[in-house]
């Protein structure tokens, strides 16, 4: 594999086909724009040459977007002569190091890399719908990222969810393990499920998702069945107040996990309640 560093016109750069990693907006992207404005782009993007003077971005989509916003028309790039399969593997490896990856991003990235590695090895991609198949590239991917082979396939299962349900997984409205179970439902039944989720304002627990999958396998999953299952009261869904992560993320340090944010919100509410009680006593 040969590589070289060149100055390349931004207009010659095109996004990676089916890039699974979403561009960040808000404070995170604003910080990147400001960093490039003050110190320049310190790390070159990685690209591969295409036909007619175009280059496909392998790594650096966010940096290219920031440069476009700043009106920068030329960037430093590491140009690598890569096959399509090598490009996919390099792209996934470069982006899996990012913080705060969404489940959907990991899901499609894992799937792309598994398929690319199989093609590169000269084997046709096998059916990825099963969690545990024979020894394959998922084992190698899991070893690289500290995850089990089965966990890699569980993430890949998420790619079988309809977009509305996958979005709920990213928003943490549906937990990961129930989502894997739901992914085995046919698209028609998933659409029934999303309608009933909105109607009942409830999402399935793991045991409920497993029952829905069992009903589906038996050909017994109907609107009434889904409604009956979701209508069961679950302790963790009584009187819930939900916040969209993207709405409150800007108020916390970038390294805060969702659990860290939850703890901080509870602590602030406790302090606010004590202050209200103290003010009430003083007014008596």
Image: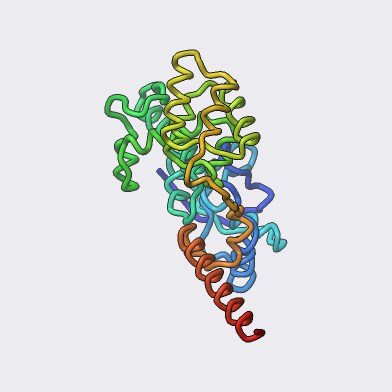
* Residue shown at 52% from the left, 45% from the top: 237
**Residue nearest the observer in this picture, 113 or 64:** 113
Q: Is residue 100 left or right of residue 119?
A: right
In the rendered view, tell whether residue 26 sits above or below residue 278. Answer: above
| Residue at screen point 63% across, 44% down | 14
- Quadrant holding the C terminus: bottom right
The residue at the point 55 percent across, 53 percent down is: 60
With respect to residue 82, does 240 lie above or below?
A: below
Residue at the extreme front of the image, as rendered: 284
Query: Furthest-top residue in view?
Result: 219
Q: Is residue 113 visible?
A: no
**Residue that extends furthest to the bottom in the rendered view of this protein:** 282
Q: Where does the image place residue 252, in percent across and percent down from the top left?
A: 55, 67
Residue 166 position (above or below residue 241) = above
Residue 29 locus on image (x, y percent):
62, 60
**123 left or right, relative to 221:** left
- Quadrant of the image for the N terminus? top left
Relative to the observer, which residue lies in front, 1 or 100?
100
Task: Depth check: give the residue in front, 116 or 161.
Answer: 161
Which residue is nearer to you in this view: 56 or 150? 150
Q: Residue at x 72, y 61 (%)?
A: 71
What colour scheme does the image use?
rainbow
For residue 52, what is the image quadrant? top right
User: Residue 248 lies in what quarter of the image?
Assistant: bottom right
Residue 38 location, quadrant = bottom right
Can residue 207 be seen here? The reply is yes
Q: Position of residue 104 (x, y in %)?
A: 51, 41
Q: Is 131 located above or below residue 271 in the figure? A: above
Q: Position of residue 162 (x, y in %)?
A: 58, 30
């Amino acid at each position: 594999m040969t590589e070289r560093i060149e100055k390349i016109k931004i207009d010659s750069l095109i996004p990676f086909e089916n890039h699974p990693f979403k561009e960040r907006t808000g404070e995170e992207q604003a910080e990147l724009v400001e960093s490039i404005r003050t110190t320049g782009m310190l790390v070159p993007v990685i690209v591969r040459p295409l036909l007619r003077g175009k280059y496909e971005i392998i790594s650096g989509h966010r940096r290219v977007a920031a440069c476009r916003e700043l009106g920068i028309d030329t960037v430093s790039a590491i140009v690598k002569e890569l096959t399509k399969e090598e490009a996919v593997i390099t792209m996934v490896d470069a982006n899996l190091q990012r913080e705060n990856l969404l489940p959907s991003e990991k899901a499609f990235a894992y799937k792309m890399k598994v398929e690319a590695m199989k093609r590169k090895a000269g084997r046709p991609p096998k059916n990825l719908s099963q969690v545990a198949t024979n020894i394959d590239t998922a084992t190698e991917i899991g070893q690289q990222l500290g995850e089990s082979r089965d966990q890699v396939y569980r993430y890949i299962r998420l790619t079988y969810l309809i977009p509305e349900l996958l979005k709920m997984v990213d928003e943490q409205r549906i937990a990961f393990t129930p989502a894997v179970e739901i992914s085995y439902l046919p698209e028609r039944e998933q659409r029934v499920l999303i309608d009933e989720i909105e109607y009942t304002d409830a999402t399935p627990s793991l045991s409920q998702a497993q029952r829905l999958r069992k009903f589906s396998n038996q050909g017994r999953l109907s609107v009434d069945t889904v409604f009956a299952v979701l209508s069961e009261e679950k302790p963790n869904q009584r009187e819930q107040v939900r916040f969209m992560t993207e709405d409150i993320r800007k108020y916390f340090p970038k390294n805060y996990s969702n659990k860290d944010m939850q703890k901080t919100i509870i602590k602030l509410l406790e302090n606010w309640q004590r202050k209200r009680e103290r003010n009430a006593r003083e007014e008596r």
